[in-house]
Amino acid sequence: MDEALFLSGLLAAGIRLAAPIALAAIGETLSERAGVINVGIEGIMLVGAFVAVLFAVQSGNPWIGLACAVLAGVAMGALHAYFVVRLKVEQIVTGIAVLFLGLGLSGYGYRLTLGEAGTAVKVPGFRELDILGLADIPLVGPILFGQHALVYIAVAAALLMAYLFRATRLGVIIKAVGETPVAADAVGIDVDRVRFLCVMVAGGFAGAGGAYLSTAHLWGFVENMTAGRGFLAIACVVFARWNPMLAVLVALVFGIADAAQIRLQSIFPAVPYQFFVIVPYVVAIVSLAVGSRSSRMPAALGIPFARPR
Amino acid sequence: MAGSETPAPLVALRGVTKRFGEVVANNTVDIEIGRGEVVALVGENGAGKSTIVNMLSGVFPPDEGRIEIDGAAARFTSPGDAVAAGIGVVHQHYMLVPTLSALDNLALQASEIGLGRIDRAALGRRAGEVAERLGFSFERNQRIDSLDVAHQQRIEIIKALMHDVRLLVLDEPTAVLGAEDKARLFETIRELRSRGVSVVLITHKLDDVFAVADRAVILRNGAVAAMLAVEGLAPEIVVRHMVGSGDAPAVAGLAAPQGDDDGPIAVPEEHAAQVVCRVRDVTLHRPNGSVAVAGLSFDLRAGEIVAVAGVDGNGQGEFVRCMAGMERPAAGTIECFGLTSDRRDWTAARLRRHGVSHIPEDRRRSGIVADMSLAKNYLLSHLDRSDFSRFGLLRNRRLSEVVADRLVRYGVRARGSGDRMGNLSGGNQQKVVLARELDGDPHLILAAHPSRGLDLKTIDFVHTVLGEARAAGKAVLLLSSDIDEILALADRIVVFASGRSFGPARREDVDRRTIGGWIAGHADLPA
Amino acid sequence: MTAGLRMPALAAVAFLVLMVVALILLAGADPASLAYGVVERALFTRAGLLEALLRTIPLTLMGLGIAIAFKARVFNIGMDGQLIAGSVLAVLAAPMLPSNVLGIVLFLALGFAGGAIWGGVAGVIKARFGGNEIIATIMLNYVAVQMLSWLVRGPLQEKMRIIPRSDAIDQALRLPVIFDGTRIHAGLIVAVLAVVVTALVLMRGRFGYRLAVVGSNEHAARYAGISPARMAAVVLVLSGALAGLAGAVEVAGLYGRLQEGFAPGFGIAAIAVALVARLNPLLVPVSAFGFSLLYAGLGALARNGVVPFPLINILEGTIILVFLAGSVALSRGSGRMKEAVADG
């Protein structure tokens, strides 16, 4: 029973820790399917985290904070898209710039506003739900019914996106734009517009991921609090072979690794904690080595579209 | 212009001019296309055919002049406008998404079904009806990249005809087709004509013109050189208009003679004895994992040209890449110069060091570095040459001297060895690639579609150079989908078709019809 | 098409500049006097100028590493980790080194090797398994930071066991100061040498040629027998080595010991440095000095509470974007942007 409780707790915590990565990964899947990689989503998540806290405190409502974080993410996505889709410059380099901007904007904004006081501000954050009062069911309750609303939203979004790619014409258009943009263009699809929109939506998802970190997982903003989760999200997309549902599952693996390392720290106090902190990163490095050989990459990923002459 | 007397033509180009920088691609072109008429647009590469296709399909507008539909000026700002105006285009490089199924490719353009769920059953029925009218069958649910080019072309045509199409533009549709598929395509074109659909057929093959066209419009240097009714027309006249008066260098290659009389140069026996490569029981897979060729075995000898023929997508590209050390066969072995394909040292670098040179299939993608100078492009295959570097540093002056010499010898039109590769025309780029790959005394030359996309004079040049290489005792593996080229050059011929290989057969033992039959997948000639 | 991109590119530049101005105004500062303050602090005070020069040394070394990597289109963004790995290896072996000039050279060589190893891990993942180097290098950053944190609290902690830092290395292993009365040390010479060697290799060498081919057309490289995967591994080793060297130089030249956070944000800054230098090794030191002036000036003002320090990251991002947009705006209308761009 103890093991079962431990595992149940581990899984519940793993899901909690996976959610921000999953949200960002779902968005990035959409963007990369359309042919645009954004290595700056770490920066967008940071902006989302900061904006969510700021507006949650201002309004007293975490949902308003979340909405603002999504909008900020969309704006950051639009900036990325403007450069890589409109101006057609190098995607990776632009992404790096977006990363710096996000790092700077969140830290700068925080120090100007909430961080100025030097004392902790009370953040009205999200609480875990208790769906139909079932969260108290032993073992499965906390896993299935006691998560944050954003967790359910993330799963729903992944399902919706899987349906989008499998069954709808919009999904076909997005896949075509990322795979063979000339073919999409030849049938009258505005490749750049599709890409622009996908990158903006991806930014929104990253913003939501950041909001989760600062208003659901923790209640407060710390500079650079994403700690590489944006990059883990990109790794998820690759390991999941650009499949949104799989991306969520990979994110869950990272989440569980993170939850496990926190627990292991208290089980093995003799071992320096740093060895546990690196677990999710090492998991990512190992899976890079194991799971990278895939031919499913959208063929036009990273390549700006220009009509042939 | 005088539209009041006769009914306006379906589509007309009026004084259309298009420039790209300094280059005039089309110069005051006037073409009229009547209803239910098949117009062949012929000309050499660079004559301006593709530019017309692109303007008709809305990729870009003309700089001057206008396109009229039913006598009214039409302005296409995007390909969508052309589709709406009833113009369907089958591009030379098919505009299909290789990772999607045929149905999803059809859904891509079916804007009338909205953005939501695709009713694949209904879409399949609609496509099925179009296919049935044309006498086609096609795979609906398989990924495009698992189908051969002829099949892909059928899907492209269905795609174009799913809409209410009044003009169908076919850009070099026969370039990659075998004889049987070609015949079927012509049947389709006739069928379309009988239903009042106009067809513009872009081609550089005279056979195509005489097979289906009502009228031939001949382009030269971006302008209309002649407009002739096909009936009673002599091939020589077309050729003269294409290449201009005075020189008709490769009329033989164009006018497609029966070919049995122009046998290859006799091979010196002492060269023929030397086996350069052994191919044993080789199986090749397509990128999607399906078997392209199984049980391929033959020897490649010094001083001969072996041609690999067949419809594109039947494993030829994979074979050449295996020979070059870029890939390994799925089963069986290739042995060249003591290297074996199942060992670790079967790499492009190793094989090149042993004297394998490679003229890649896709020049723009794999053969050149557009952003670098001609000298640096030449260096690509000669980095190990001792006189080009000292202490790991490049001797740029020495390199420039050598390259400048090659530019003269190969007649490359460029400002000098420092010119940027991307500034050169396709033919001149290919000449630089040839100079690079034939230098340094290679023992085996892999020439994948060495003349694809080039003009007649350059094609002639390529053939001469390859012939000289054979005479010098080099082994040449020629990959080509052009029967004329193969018959003109090869000593022995292998055909890849329908999952197997035919031959190798000696050039003098086969004729055009046998090869055509093999390409179509028949062991013996169809009755 | 390119000609049509000039206005949108200029609009982007205008937007970014306005954004920065607005952010400075939000902080209650005056942009003009802020800019003047930065310049004054950095250029017209001895302390500021020397601080900038001191920072130019590691930024140059790391900027060169980024230039090498990005030229081959290998995106090493894990220089911070490689810097740590290099300095850790050097400090670990320091007690065994002879107390003379040879010891200094070996110390730096160990830094070089440590960075090479850390970069090499990402290189193996990229070359052997096709793993994305961006993710690999950034993950290795986090691992390196944690390892350093453990080392300076555990096995390498100073004998007093008070502050999380190592004991000082032998004075004989320290890089000598080359200008009396300043802290400018012999690392400057190392940096100059690195610039010369890198410039020769990249611009004239066979290796640099291969690198450029891989960076401009991977397919052509493969057809010519150059393995882009192996090249990527070598490039990650080399750029990691330069970061490791920078780490060893910082330890031997400035701090004399290992401590946490001793080169804050240098890995990120190096990317900005190299991009602004347009990956030209000869321009890297110039660009590095420019950014160092910015750091020195802005750092001083931030300490006085004029603006929050993260403005520096905003400026780094903005400068890169302005450069990208600027290169679009300046590319003349005659040619299309890049041939390679067209194929889908």
Image: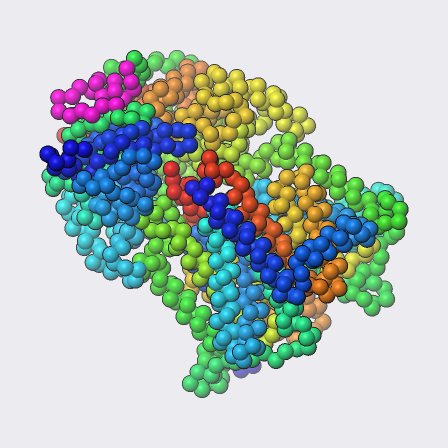
For image coordinates 50% across by 56% down, the residue present is A79
Q: Going by the image, does B509 lie left or right of C57?
A: left
Does residue C265 appear in the picture of this structure?
no
The total of numbered circles placed on residues is 0
- Residue A201 quadrant: bottom left
- Residue C215 is situated, as x and y percent measured from the top left of the image, at 55, 40
x 71%, y 43%: residue: C285
Q: In front here: B459 or A306?
A: A306
Q: Quadrant of residue B459?
A: top left
Which residues make up the magenta segment?
B225-245
Residue positioned 37% across, 14% down in the render = B267
The quarter of the rendered structure image containing the N terminus of chain C is top left
Please state which of residues C63 and B526 is positioned toward the viewer in this rendering.
C63
Q: Position of residue A162 (x, y in %)?
A: 38, 63
Image x and y of residue A127, in percent = 52, 80
User: Image quadrant for the C terminus of chain C?
Assistant: top left
Task: Classify residue C172 as left or right of residue C200.
Answer: right
Tell me where residue B15 appears, x and y as whole percent.
27, 31
- Could you say which is closer to the camera, residue B4 or residue A113? B4
In this view of the protein, which residue sits in the foreground, A76 or A213? A76
